[in-house]
Image: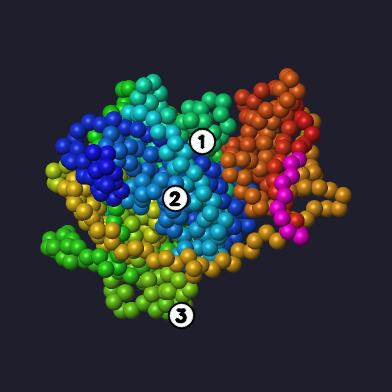
Amino acid sequence: MDQRLGQFSGVKWSKLRMALAVLALAIGTTGAYRVGVGRADCTGPSVEITFMGYAQVTQRGTGIHLRQYARSYVIEDESGTRVVFVSVDAGMMGHAVKRDVLAVLQKKYGELYTHANVVISGTHTHSTPGGFLMYLLYDLTSLGFVPETFNALVHGIAQSVIRAHNNLVEARLYVAETEVLEANINRSPSAYENNPEEERAQYRHNVDKTLVQLQFVHARTGAPFGAINWFAVHPTSMNNTNRLVSSDNVGLAAILLEQERNPGALVGKGDFVGAFASSNLGDVSPNINGPKCEKTGLPCDVLTSSCPSGAGACFASGPGRDMFESTEIIADRLYRAAAGLLSTRTTKAREVTGPVAFVHQYVDMTTAETVHFDRATQTPVRVRGCLPAMGYSFAAGTTDGPGAFDFQQGTITDNVLWNAVRDFIAEPTQDDKDCQAPKPILLATGRARFPYDWQPKVVPTQLLVVGDFAMAAVPGEFTTMAGRRLRSAVARASVAAGGRDLQVVVAGLSNMYSSYITTPEEYEIQRYEGASTLYGPHTLTLYLEQYKRLAGALVRNETVPAGPTPPYEDDKQISLTTGVIFDSHPLGKEFGDVKVQPEAAYERGATVSAVFIAGNPRNNLMHDKSFFTVEQQQPDGNWSVVATDANWETSDIEFSWTIGPNTLDGLYRFRHFGYYRYILGGVYPYVGATNAFSVK
């Protein structure tokens, strides 16, 4: 018997377990779970690298505001079927990053973790280093590929999964929901209003206000040890003037939740792991005071988000006085909602039971076709995907971060001058123009191949199902209504195939980035989101058909072909970012020496600052460590760490600490840890400390 089981190992055994899981999925049987949670530091280079999100070359890092973390959740049912969900404090996820993470995991665990059962989702913060996507348009402002960013993400994500793998415990799962008001607004309401009136009438708001929480609870003790929260909001409270690496509002919300659940632990430490993952946030802004003209404070034009001549750019802001306070307010509202669900689990949550299942397929969106029911003609029509292209309104940016030049959102006509520039790079065919209409093509990215692909053509599609809870992992930014249609389509397809009525969340910016996905009606208006919908007006239509196929195949236990593999282009990457050549210090000084000491005493609420002679932070990213610590002297004379560069109230490179209201009286000091690169070669560590100062 043992010998026969051994011969049945590997792929066949995996398929058998999957078949049993899918059978149980269809009939809704109850099963126990084992769950592991893990967290790891994945902070990229904090200086000299352009951030990914606002596409501004000048927005380069000068230090750390909040560190980046990868938070992983391994879920296994009683048949041994596993899925993994990872939420990463990053702009989005790249296919090559996931591929290399899986290479690390497969070296340790064989084929246990694959593209099919692992989802890696970026939170979409716009304040972390870029240069990791390996498509030219997305890495352009980072001056090409940045190995330090890429490697930091791969290492941190893989380490978080390994930690989750090593922490598996018997668990019960619960789902809870709550409404969070005053945390998001629709930044393209004119596009949303173009959706059918009868569809809009089904919803109270023009953005999703529901926070959905998947809770992981110890089976024996009943204590929560992890949670994933999905809420639709852009992490753009930190605006495009920010120069500090930051996980923004959702990253801070995760820190606040983890600090509450891990009392006494430093940021990034502790057993409880709580993520705030991205959802259908495409047209959703945290800047709830709305868009105003920069110089007059008057509202911007609703359709174009433009201002009269001399009134400045159209910016959205709020709810705070500046971006730091706005980040803190939005984060606090999200954190309190999530914490409330955890504390009232027995009354507000329902238990998830049933097997684990997954399905994954790559799709070439440029050749995909389906039949679409045309509302205007009341007839079915065949629609197709287009070669990727970006419209004129893409260059206008958004109200969270306006673009350069004099582009406006809502543009549906082209310009001879800009067309000439476009055609010099890559000229679209008449078929491209017809396929993308009414989008006027500014960049024919699907035709551009020099020095490598500018945007993806092949994308991953994926579903993870735990009991009756489904995660639809999508490779881009779905708008509010696009996400609503996707959730409904997957749930209906499951029931139609004879399966359970699924509760579906949209797991945004997962596995690969392919810009935005709007509804066909929103596409017509050509706001920023529509102009950035790559594969034409029926991009969403194609996705809906694909995810319905995946849901049906999962219930019916059908084998889904892997589909075409995205191209390998690592060997074509260009990097114009220079490395650190060497570090120097003034004569008579050493690395770690303090140039500016703190004052002798401070009151609560004050900000303490110190300046050290430091090496370049790119010499060592200090994962799971810190460039500096705030330390309090204990009665025995020893010093204990009370804050690190991962805390909200600290920042570097000029190290500073804003003294919180709950800080204890006593003597404190800063310590700085770093590495310098010697002119004759080698990287060497150093440590420095300030004079002690008192807090009263």
Q: Main secondary structure of the magenta part?
A: strand
Q: Which residues are magenta?
A: 679-688
Residue that mark 3 sits on: 424
Q: Amino acid at mark 2?
A: Lys
Q: Is residue 675 left or right of residue 576?
A: right
Give residue 406's position: percent from left, percent from top.
Answer: 49, 67
Callout 3, which amino acid?
Answer: Phe
Q: Which residue is mark 2?
A: 107
Which quarter of the figure is the N terminus placed in? Answer: top left
Which amino acid, mark 1?
A: Ile
Q: CA distance from mark 1 to mark 3?
A: 47 Å
Q: Nearer the viewer, residue 180 or 95?
A: 95
Residue that sits furthest to the top in the current view: 635
Comes first in the chain, label 2 or label 1: 2
Q: Earlier in the sequence, mark 2 or mark 3?
A: 2
Report the quarter where the C terminus lies: top right
Q: Which is more toward the observer, 359 or 461?
A: 359
